[in-house]
Amino acid sequence: QVQLVESGGGSVQAGESLRLSCVASGYTYSGGCMAWFRQAAEKEREVIASIYTRWTGGTMAWHSGSVRGRFTVWQDSPNNTLYLQMASLNSEDTAMYYCAAQSGSTWGRCAGRGESEFGYWGQGTQVTVSE
């Protein structure tokens, strides 16, 4: 059974940075896809970053236009942890952030794909940015 546990959220001022972590247990990285989603109040959940692990090793990452250049996704597979480094935060980044995972994926089914592609979810961690 795959379990995902996020941490690192909090309240910050605009312009500051945060790093979110997602510890995965029972998850196979090779050929799998992990992603960060966020859901702001009264808005739909949106994917902001995805990372695919090739069967032959190495990863491929995707970031949405709203965070590209400010957020970076990467994973530390030996330590079973997915990260999201967030910089230059602004009030529009205020949301609940979720980690998601799916084994047996492909790059085409990973990069920028929505909720339906992921079978495993964390409980979320809240990020609040004050201007």
Image: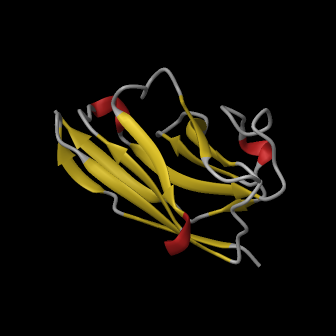
Q: Quadrant of the N terminus?
A: bottom right
- Picture colour scheme: secondary structure
Residue 107 sits in quarter: top right
Estimate the x, y position of residue 29 in percent, counting from the top left.
69, 62
Estimate the x, y position of residue 7 in percent, counting from the top left.
40, 66
Residue 44 sits in quarter: top right
Query: Compared with residue 115, is residue 10 higher up or lower down, i.e. above or below?
Result: below
Query: Compared with residue 105, is residue 29 higher up or lower down, i.e. above or below?
Result: below
Residue furthest to the front in view is 56
Query: Compared with residue 26, is residue 97 higher up or lower down, i.e. above or below?
Result: above
Relative horizontal placement of residue 13, taking residue 85 as reference (left or right): left
Residue furthest to the top in view is 65
Q: Quadrant of the C terminus?
A: top left
Q: Residue at x 79, y 32 (%)?
A: 108
Relative horizontal placement of residue 106, taking residue 13 as reference (left or right): right
Query: Compared with residue 53, is residue 120 higher up or lower down, i.e. above or below?
Result: below
Q: Residue at x 26, y 31 (%)?
A: 90
* Front position in the image: 101 or 122: 101
